[in-house]
Image (cartoon, coloured by chain):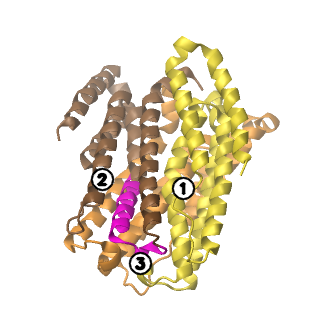
Chain colours: A yellow, B brown, C orange
């Protein structure tokens, strides 16, 4: 593949690989919990612990394709580095969500959604990037650089808890 | 990234972003329904309404990666515009499916699959596009343009309900 | 799209399309089983057969995005042919897993994870490919060719059951 293209996707690929590793870690937890309790048809007779880890994994997996889609859109159409950084933040949030879900008593499980702020940020970056792509004839390429700088600066705001 | 490449994927990215937005909308519905009824371990004691919206979301999410895969294959190897148009149609069908699933009484839920015709069309486009790629030495590039025109024309057929 | 890029992804796209076809086959099985037994709210009153096919499909779908992510990372950053070959092997393993899951008595279902060896191999290829990308200034391009040869050779080892 062309060097120029690889340069534009290498950070995104790194984050994607890390997320794949995290997926495997989650799946491993489910596998382990399922084996420990020998729950045969788990949707009925699963232990609460197994049910919780299964749900946590399910919720993470449900949100995963959406995350990958906005991560790559933002990275390719707007700016790579802030998108990859946000992706990394999302992986931290997801880890915290998963661990939190497992450790919770059944009285209060976290909601179905998580990392809304990061997904919104990536979505916004994509929209701005694509809008800029269509309007580049009117605006010129100065605006693109301005947007990229803005994205870099505002991605740091995601660090605020 | 190279302008030439961006031009070839911008419509696909737009459809992907729209689908991500729709995913978030579905997830929001699940979150909302789950909070309203305070179902703790929903796989057992969920209300029928929650179970229905959870199932609808699950079925949509199960089909999502397949959709993205055929959308991008068709768009890159055959022709971008008809693929993006079909993707847009799929999003409409999905919305209708989701709303229909939620509104149904539990007597008759729609099936597990939906949008079969659109997925088949995108799949066919991908196969034709890849076959054409391998056979381009024999056929020449006239055939490719012919196929693209054909794809554009036949994508309009998806509008027939 | 540029011919040069298409050449570098055509095999990966082929494997992805095949996997999409397999997904549809799995979904068809779920649809069929669900209709046969007229299970309305299946998470509760589903027959054991339906529950089994639903679980098998769910487990396959949960692992699917991870598979696609490592397949494409390995194919783009390391070497296309071995990655596509491993992907093909994964599809075989998945088919065997699905059929095995359906045919099993409820006494012993297979675990949640499958195809660990292939996913690990693809993951390793991606990591080596990306490491090589960053270190290419130090190592030179000889190392890349050496790695690609090594990947081709070792992908054959996946054939050992």
Asked whether, in this view, residue C6 is left or right of residue C143, the answer is left
Mark 1 belongs to chain: C
Task: From the image, state whether disc 2 or disc 1 is nearer to you.
Answer: 2
Callout 2 touching callout 1 (CB < 8 Å): no
Is A63 in front, or is A3? Answer: A63
Decide whether residue A104 is among the magenta residues: no
Taking the view exactly as shown, the residue that stands out farthest to the front is B36
Q: Is residue B79 above or below residue C92?
A: above
Q: Mark 2 to mark 3: distance in Å?
A: 23 Å
Asked whether, in this view, residue A85 is left or right of residue A23, the answer is right
* Residue at image coords 34%, 37%: B88
Q: Is residue B143 above or below residue C9?
A: above
Residue denoted by label 3 = B44
**Discs 2 and 3 lie in a common subunit:** yes
**Discs 3 and 1 lie in a common subunit:** no
Task: From the image, state whether disc 3 or disc 1 is nearer to you.
Answer: 3
Q: Is residue C159 above or below residue A37?
A: above
Mark 2 belongs to chain: B
Query: Element type at marker 3?
Result: helix
Query: Element type at marker 2?
Result: helix
* Residue at image coords 54%, 39%: A123
Q: Main secondary structure of the magenta part?
A: helix
Callout 3 touching callout 1 (CB < 8 Å): no
Q: Mark 2 to mark 1: distance in Å?
A: 29 Å
Mark 3 belongs to chain: B
Counting every numbered tag in the picture gives 3
Q: Mark 3 to mark 1: distance in Å?
A: 29 Å
Asked whether, in this view, residue C106 is left or right of residue C2, the answer is left
Decide whether residue B48 is among the magenta residues: yes
Question: What span is in magenta?
Answer: B40-63
Name the mark on residue B99: 2
Residue denoted by label 1 = C66
């Amino acid at each position: 593949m062309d060097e120029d293209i690889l340069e534009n996707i290498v950070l995104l690929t790194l984050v994607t690989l890390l997320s794949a590793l995290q997926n495997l870690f989650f799946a491993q937890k489910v596998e382990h919990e399922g084996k420990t309790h020998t729950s045969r048809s788990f949707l009925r007779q699963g232990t609460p612990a197994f049910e919780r880890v299964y749900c946590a994994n399910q919720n993470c997996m449900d949100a995963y394709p959406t995350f990958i889609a906005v991560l790559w859109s933002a990275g390719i159409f707007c700016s790579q580095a802030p998108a990859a950084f946000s992706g990394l933040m999302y992986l931290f949030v997801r880890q915290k969500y998963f661990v939190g879900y497992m450790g919770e008593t059944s009285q209060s499980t976290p909601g179905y959604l998580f990392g809304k702020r990061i997904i919104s940020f990536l979505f916004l970056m994509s929209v701005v990037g694509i809008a800029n792509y269509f309007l580049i004839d009117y605006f010129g390429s100065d605006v693109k650089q301005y947007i990229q700088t803005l994205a870099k600066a505002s991605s740091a705001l995601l660090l605020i808890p």
